[in-house]
Structure formats: structure tokens, C-alpha cells
Image: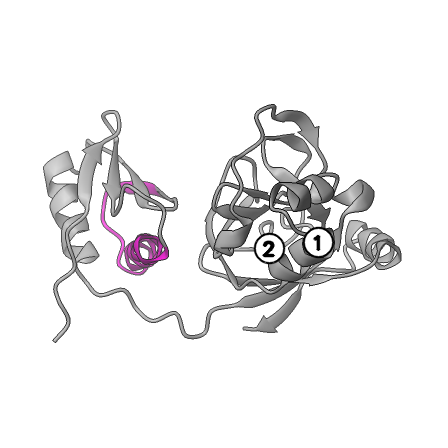
Amino acid sequence: MAEPLSPPRLLPSGDSAITVEFSRTIDDAANRRVLALDRVIAAEPIAGITETVPTYRSLLVHYDPVQISFDALGAQLLARAAKAPPSETGTRRWRIPVTYGGEHGIDLEDVAKALQTTPDQIVARHVAGDYRVAMIGFTPGWSYLSGLERFLHMPRRKDPRLLTPAGTISIGGIQTGVQCLAGPSGWHLLGRTPVRTYQLHRDPTFLLEPGDAITFTAVDAKTFAEQDRAAEAGEFVAELVTP
């Protein structure tokens, strides 16, 4: 018989939101519970909830305090969180092409030196990873991925860059990620993908969702350029390996 799940902490977030915290550290087990609770709320709506925001280890629940009180909502959230997380069978798996190194991954050689290995070994290890989209945040469509091999764990840069390219694939701490829009970053840039994980006028606007599985495949610069042009025209997206 499975042991009962430990209850999450309920933390008030202002006067109209509750943070349902499953862990104080990043781990996949907590993240699965976050996403499971988010799905349960979507399937079994609670009157008064206006929005839910899943993160690595907690679910932020916005609500209308006129319709439901903190205590009443908290009790319902705890009851739903006590349910065992459903299996992730049927998870979507995406294969995302990446051009590593050179102008597309300007930190690849420095990362290899820091880890006392070669750029080719960094690419091989990164491509071999099996990743999960743990959360979407920072900028629209920015996908934080869990599952980075311990060997590739790197402290973030001491001096963040003010601008890094859209489509950058990078590592920072114990995570890797897919950057959707140009913006600042303190992560180490390994490569770029032509895949647009966020396009405002596309349906769906966000390609990746929390819980999706991700694998990367290395492509050369010529292939990147061809796929980048096709993606800009809306004619190319990542390969969906399993629905």
C-alpha cells in the first residue's frame, strides 16, 4: 500500500492568491504534483479561482476573496493535492534541433574548459539527455527543463548578458532551457534552435507545455539556416515524436 503523500504548505500571497508549495527544492516529484494539481483544478473547477500558475515546486492560485475565503479554498486545495498524481502516460515528446557552438553557442568552448572536457563531449552529453518541461516563465514561452545530467551542472555566469538571441539553448545551475525571445540571461549559451516555442499569432501560441518531454538533436549551421527561414514563415515546428 502506497504511503500517503505529505500535504503541501499553503502560503498567503497577498489578499487574493495562495501559493501551494510542495517542496522547498527543485525536484521532479514535487513538480509532478504541482502539474497534477493544476490539471485537477482545470478538470474540477473551484468557484472563485481566477487563474493558476504552475512553477517548479509550487502552484500559485489566484482567487476572488468575495466568492471564497482563504480557509475554504485552502481546504479544497489540500483535498485535491492529497490525491495521487496521475501517471504521465501519453506525455507529448518533442525532438528539437539545435546547432551547437560557434556564433550560435558562444559559451560552448568555455563550458568545456570549465568541465575539463571537449566541446564535442558537452554536445554529446547534452543531446543524450531526457528532459521535462518543468515550467514556463521569465518571458513568454521560456521553457525551464529538468533532467540535466549532473556532469553538466554549472554555476550561472558572474556577469549576466543584457541581450542573448531568441532560440538559445543554455544551461544554468542544474537546469537547461529553451529561450523563446531575445533577452537578458546569466546562463551559458550552448547553441540555438530554429524552433519558435512562442509565436503570438500562431495557434497554439505556446508550443511547449509543462510536463512535455524533450530531446535535442544536433544539426549543422546550414540546416539551422534552412529551418530558421521555414520557422519564420510558419512552415516548421519541432518534431512531435509521441502525442
Q: Is residue 90 above or below residue 37?
A: below
Disc nearer the start of the sequence (1/2): 1
Residue 34 located within the stretch drawn in magenta: yes
Answer with left or right where residue 117 lies relative to residue 53.
right
Taking depth in this image into account, of 189 and 39 the one nearest to the observer is: 189
Q: Is residue 66 above or below residue 146?
A: above
Going by the numbered disc 1, the residue's amino acid type is Val
Where residue 195 is drawn, which disc sits there? 1
Taking depth in this image into account, of 110 and 205 the one nearest to the observer is: 110
Specify the segment rendered in magenta. Answer: 28-51
State if disc 2 and disc 1 touch (CB < 8 Å): yes
Where residue 35 is drawn, which disc sits there? none
**Helix, strand or loop: magenta stretch:** helix
Answer with left or right where residue 209 lies relative to residue 205.
left
Q: Nearer the observer, disc 1 or disc 2?
A: 1
Going by the numbered disc 2, the residue's amino acid type is Leu
Picture quadrant where residue 52 is located? top left
Residue 46, percent across and down? 23, 50
